[in-house]
Image: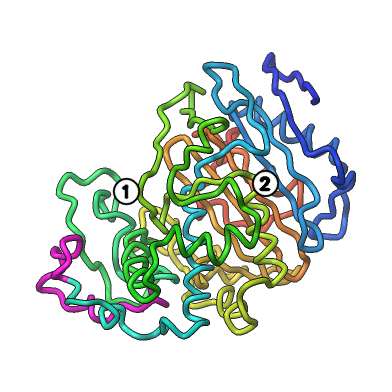
Amino acid sequence: MKIAISAGIILFCFALAFGQAQQIKQINGNKISTAEVDRIVTDLMAKAKVTGLALSILNENRTVYTKSYGYKNKQKNELLDNSTVLYGASFSKAVFAFLTLKVVEEGLLDLDKPLFQYLDKPLTDYEDYADLAGDERWKLITARMCLSHTTGFPNWRFLNARTGNFDANGKLAIYFQPGTKYGYSGEGIKLLQLAVEKVTGKNLEELAAEILFKPAGMNRTSFVWQESFENNFAYPHNSNEETQGKKKKKKADGAGSLQTTIADYSKFIEFVMQNKVLNKKMRMMMIAPQIEIASKYQFPTISDETTDENKTIQLSHGLGWVVLKTKYGRAFFKAGHDDGWQNYNINFKDKGISIIIMTNSDNGESIFKELLEKIIGDTFTPWKWERYTPYNMK
């Protein structure tokens, strides 16, 4: 255990000491020492008041460094470690996309067949989709549209689609012709989950355990809360580093109920980077551009604001991941965000380099830009589009 003192804050750092690289390879070919990584992380956490952070780095498609910093519960002075269960938020969508593509590979689901054709009754006969009565564009929605976020649905029906604020009306609607433009949507993933569970005859948790969790050895990962998590889990913290209440999801949700550890999620990324489970066709399709992203920001999800800022990296959405091109080859990423939880993962496929950052802090995203640049040399992540405003620019 190493104790780092910065700005009067004591950060206790726990690491997997055995077998970890002492030098981390960056995407530009340079190397950075793990001691320098520690210095960067602890310094930025102190400056931006990030309560807890878990970090993992892959070189040559395998995990070479995993370490946790700070608190899982600051109010009780309880420390975060590599086995602490964290809320994955929208990391859930990357895992769900991976599972769905396996279902497609097995011939149970066609990416371009309208989803309603897999259901037992018309979509609007399901209580959750009764709001769509009178708008038959729901008949156009396919699995490809759900995974590429082109359904026309808002992110969530309980949020105003154009502001992102809570919407007491809470009705589901289609805001543009499905398949024609990008608009991030948890509702689209929810619809796809309904179809996936129907064609497989299994619930999401069963499917995930069979295809991924058990084969990868992800023993502390689940889409529903497990009793085994009670011995070591993290609480969310607000921007003042006050400990908030913990939600323990009882229903599997492919859009946002994943509970995992930094060690376990690294195993998932290893499976993705090492080309495990999915065949070559599915792997290539997963990170191939499906739709150009021209929106100025990712959120709010329904907006007429556009930008050319991300044309140089050819920002697009694949199947479950945002994809881009860099001078170092292809890259794809997924973020996760909720109150008190801010996560980010980017993978440079042609370099075999990945970084995973998970935080239980509302201030986490404010250090993502600098962490990415200094640790792996990533200057390509569209931080403005993600609204990752640095702590020293607010």
313 part of magenta stretch: no
Residue under numbered circle 1 = 164
Residue at screen point 50% across, 72% down: 319
* Residue 202, position as x, y percentages in the image: 39, 67
Residue at screen point 59% across, 43% down: 358
Q: Does residue 49 appear to the left or right of 186 in the view shown?
A: right
Q: Which residues are magenta?
A: 124-145
Real-space Cα separation, disc 2 to disc 1, in angstroms: 32 Å
Amino acid bearing label 2: Ala
The residue nearer to you, when weighing 176 against 236, is 236
Residue at screen point 47% across, 21% down: 242
Residue under numbered circle 2 = 263
Residue at screen point 65% across, 50% down: 356
- Most common secondary structure along the magenta stretch: helix
Amino acid bearing label 1: Gly
Verify CB contact (< 8 Å) between mark 2 and mark 1: no
